[in-house]
Image (cartoon, grey):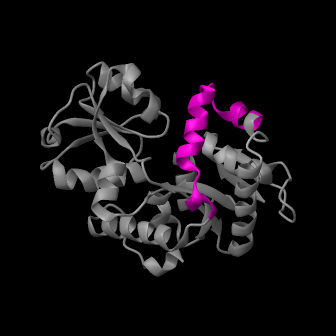
């Protein structure tokens, strides 16, 4: 079975057991390590792999060929994207300013656009740039603000930046729901229930044997500090990773339903998520 997920610690932690043949009855995996922008594009086209980790924001483009697997993904509380600037400012001041984002097909981008519609009246000049360039660009004044995710939550103070908004806090206050970040999808021709069982078993093995995946996680963590990698896993791997559940599905329904109403994603039947 061909699978694609990122080299980020949460993904390698989750799939370590399955990749290494530690999940009884699960097929062997041929792994492609890819940035989520790559898997988002693959899921929307004819060349997607059997199973992939994509952004929930990309799901509406993938639902024709892929089903949502209710296990292995990333939802949570207190782990949302941040809007960073060089100094504290009124969010309304972002109108007419340049804001860097790592992708326009990401949960972070959807949250930013939904938040900005409430707090930053007026058009914002969106600039797409590689994730690793965003904080230096804000620091150096090339960009007025930046949208960041993942380990940047822990490292932005070292760039002399301040937090203009925590979009996770905003989303949770606005909806009472967790934040849908990364989704596992499988081709509709495959047995989604079996894939969910294998992914869940891999997650449960990771929790039961946290040391087992350490070398594998470090190998793919792109020289990330071990403490940052540990924090990354603790933040993004939680009960929703093992089972999306009713609350998780409600969060996905809310995010994508609101985004569709704003014209940020194609309209689709929410029943297709289940």
Q: Position of residue 118 (x, y in %)?
A: 18, 55
> In the rendered view of the protein, which quadrant contains the C terminus?
bottom right
> How many numbered discs?
0
Q: Position of residue 34 (x, y in %)?
A: 62, 43
User: Residue at left 37%, top 72%?
Assistant: 267
**Which residues lie in the magenta part?**
215-242
Q: Position of residue 130 (x, y in %)?
A: 44, 33
Judge whether residue 262 can be spotted in this image: yes
Residue 262 lies in quadrant: bottom left
Q: Is residue 4 above or below residue 44?
A: above
Residue 66 lies in quadrant: bottom right
Q: Is residue 184 magenta?
A: no
| Front residue of this view, candidates 133 and 42 | 133
User: Residue at left 20%, top 55%?
Assistant: 117
Instruction: Report whether 256 appears left or right of 226.
Output: left
Q: Is residue 270 above or below residue 17?
A: below
Q: Position of residue 73 (x, y in %)?
A: 58, 57
Predominant secondary structure, magenta span: helix
User: Residue at left 32%, top 60%?
Assistant: 264
Instruction: Report whether 19 appears left or right of 260.
Output: right
């Amino acid at each position: 079975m061909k699978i694609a997920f990122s080299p980020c610690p949460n993904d390698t932690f989750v799939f370590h057991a399955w990749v290494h043949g530690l999940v009884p009855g699960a097929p062997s995996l041929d792994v492609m390590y890819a940035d989520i922008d790559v898997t988002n594009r693959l899921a929307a086209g004819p060349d997607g792999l059997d199973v992939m980790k994509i952004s929930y924001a990309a799901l509406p483009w993938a639902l024709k060929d892929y089903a949502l697997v209710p296990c292995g993904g990333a939802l949570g509380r207190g782990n949302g994207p941040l809007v960073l600037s060089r100094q504290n400012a009124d969010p309304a001041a972002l109108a007419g300013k340049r804001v860097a984002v790592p992708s326009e097909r990401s949960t972070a981008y959807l949250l930013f656009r939904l938040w900005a519609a409430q707090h930053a009246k007026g058009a914002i000049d969106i600039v797409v740039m590689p994730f690793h360039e965003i904080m230096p660009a804000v620091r150096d004044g090339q960009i007025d603000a930046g949208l960041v995710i993942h380990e940047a939550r822990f490292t932005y103070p070292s760039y002399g930046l301040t937090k203009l908004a925590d979009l996770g806090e905003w989303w949770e206050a606005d909806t009472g729901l967790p934040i849908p970040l990364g989704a596992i999808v499988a081709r509709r021709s495959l047995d989604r229930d079996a894939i969910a069982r294998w992914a869940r078993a891999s997650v449960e093995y990771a929790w039961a044997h946290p040391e087992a995946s350490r070398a594998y996680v470090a190998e793919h963590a792109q020289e990330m500090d071990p403490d940052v990698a540990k924090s990354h896993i603790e933040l993004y791997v939680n009960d929703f990773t093992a089972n999306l559940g009713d609350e998780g599905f409600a969060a996905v329904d809310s995010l994508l339903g609101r985004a569709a109403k704003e014209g940020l994603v194609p309209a689709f039947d929410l029943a297709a998520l289940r």
